[in-house]
Image (cartoon, rainbow, N blue to C red):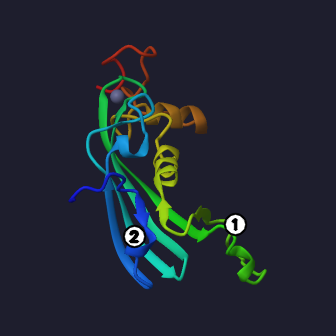
């Protein structure tokens, strides 16, 4: 089977002991991302190093998703690749007591328990992408920017970058 049913659910047995370079690719549906949350016009990729030590797997990589956002000012669609770091420590539930107490740095890395067979990364990948979605995307980097910067700093912005009436297409970014 060329396309596994769950591309982001990795069999532990498929990961070799030590360092692995893996690339997982799936769709928004695979991750349970609905069009209301985020529109994508392509596949989601998780790529990175999977370091396996027995039943513990440490993942250091990044996720990429080609998002279709809507400009906050003119409502024009924006095609922008969302890219987010992906760090995760996966271990079998119950294995934790085998390690010594000084796991410093473990707080900043996500922890995922697995059942000894499958690393189900779907929720983690989904969260990593959704957290990276900009709240106020703009179709141009400078759209409305000078006016906002001027308002923030008290300096005079350049003419023409004034934000138009809210939600009126075509008035703000051209
Ligand atoms: Zn715009």
Residue shown at 43% from the left, 24% from the top: 162
Residue shown at 46% from the left, 42% from the top: 133
Q: Where's residue 18, x and y in %? A: 45, 86
Under tag 2, what secondary structure?
strand
- Check the image and report above or below for 88 versus 72: below
In this picture, residue 18 sits left or right of residue 54: left
Q: Where's residue 74, x and y in %? A: 36, 23
Task: Identify the mark nearer the N-term, 2 or 1.
Answer: 2
What numbered label is drawn on residue 107? 1
Q: Nearer the viewer, residue 117 or 35?
A: 117
What numbered label is drawn on residue 148? none
Q: Nearer the viewer, residue 14 or 141?
A: 14
What numbered label is drawn on residue 48? 2
User: Which quadrant: the N terminus?
Assistant: bottom left
Q: Quadrant of residue 30?
A: top left
Residue shown at 57% from the left, 69% from the top: 89
Q: Where's residue 31, x and y in %? A: 42, 45
User: Which quadrant: the C terminus?
Assistant: top left
Q: Nearer the viewer, residue 91 or 51?
A: 91
């Amino acid at each position: 089977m060329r396309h596994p049913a769950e591309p982001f659910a990795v069999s532990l047995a498929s990961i070799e002991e030590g360092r692995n370079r893996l690339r997982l690719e799936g769709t928004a549906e695979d991750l349970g991302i609905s069009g209301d949350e985020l529109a994508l016009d392509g596949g989601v990729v998780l790529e990175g190093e999977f370091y396996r030590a027995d039943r513990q797997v440490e993942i250091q990589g990044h996720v990429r998703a080609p998002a279709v956002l809507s400009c906050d000012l003119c409502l024009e669609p924006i095609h922008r690749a969302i890219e987010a770091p992906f760090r995760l420590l996966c271990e079998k539930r119950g294995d934790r007591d085998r390690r010594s107490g000084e796991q410093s740095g473990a707080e900043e890395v996500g922890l995922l328990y697995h059942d000894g067979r499958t690393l189900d990364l779907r929720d983690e990948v989904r969260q990593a992408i959704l957290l990276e979605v900009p709240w106020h995307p703009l179709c141009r980097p400078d759209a409305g920017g000078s006016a906002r910067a001027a308002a923030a700093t008290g300096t005079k912005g350049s003419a023409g970058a004034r934000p138009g009436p809210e939600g009126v297409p075509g008035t703000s970014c051209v």
